[in-house]
Image: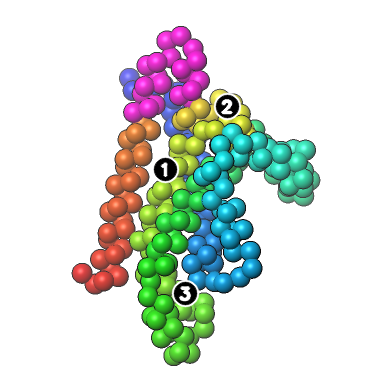
Amino acid sequence: MSWLGPEEWQAVGLSIKVAFWATLLSLPFGVLCAYALARWTFRGKMVLNGLIHLPLILPPVVTGYLLLMAFGRRGPVGEFLEAQLGLVLAFRWTGAVLAAAVMAFPLMVRAIRLGIEAVDVRLEEAAATLGAPAWAVFLTVTLPLILPGIVAGTALAAAKAMGEFGATITFVSNIPGETRTLPSAIYSFLQVPGGEAPALRLVAVSVAVALLALAASEWLARRAARRITGA
């Protein structure tokens, strides 16, 4: 007999799916934004930094409502995506990916930015003086050195995406089989009599997944650091 019921497995599977795509799609933008904040000087840098970290400050429900206004079927972006690409985000699992990515993005950027700021700029300058173009310097010098930060940021983002609730339920609701992730399922079970047992099982799964993600992040970061230092 399975420890989790079909509905519970469905919520677990959907949460993993949402977290995977939210993290994967965010990673290139996270590296770019972290590098821009750490290395570039440009007008509007403080504005960009504020926008990136805004989801950490705003109540998640507010973030979800703003996403609904912008990416809903009647929102400017959502209407364009549906008309041009046939992509609907509101009340779909794809919208849950967007909400989770937005909420996890600041944690990813912060971890990667700290990794970039820890790199000695003179190493990059030395490579540039040898005639290497900027993209080659980044790929061969900067990227290997910031790999532990990327790993840590990716794991933090994935864990945050797995546990995202407020923005997700506001933007895509709590539809079984479509948008009901682990936190939404726990909330739903707690609203009905006799739902404490399945809710507790999902809480245990959430804790186990979070601890596993953190342990994997620590192990991968240390392994990457050893490869860089040659230890």
Q: What residue lies at 42% left-to-right and 73% top-to-bottom?
A: 142
- Determine the CA span between mark 2 and mark 3: 42 Å
Using the image, tell me which numbered label, if any, was put on residue 159. Answer: 1
Residue 185 visible here: yes
Q: Which of the marked residues, 2 or 1, is nearer the chain's N terminus?
A: 1
Magenta run includes residue 193:
yes
Amino acid type, mark 1? Ala
Amino acid type, mark 3? Phe
- Would you name the residue on which mark 3 appears? 138
Provide the residue span drawn in magenta.
185-204
Residue 134, image x, y percentages: 52, 80
Please tell me whether mark 3 sits on a helix, a strand or a loop.
helix
Residue 144 visible here: no
Please tell me whether mark 2 sits on a helix, a strand or a loop.
loop
Q: Is residue 127 above or below residue 96?
A: below
Q: What residue lies at 56% left-to-right and 36% top-to-bottom?
A: 59
Residue 130, image x, y percentages: 44, 90
Please tell me whether mark 1 sits on a helix, a strand or a loop.
helix
- Would you name the residue on which mark 2 appears? 174
Q: Is residue 215 left or right of residue 32?
A: left
Q: What residue lies at 24% left-to-right and 72% top-to-bottom?
A: 230
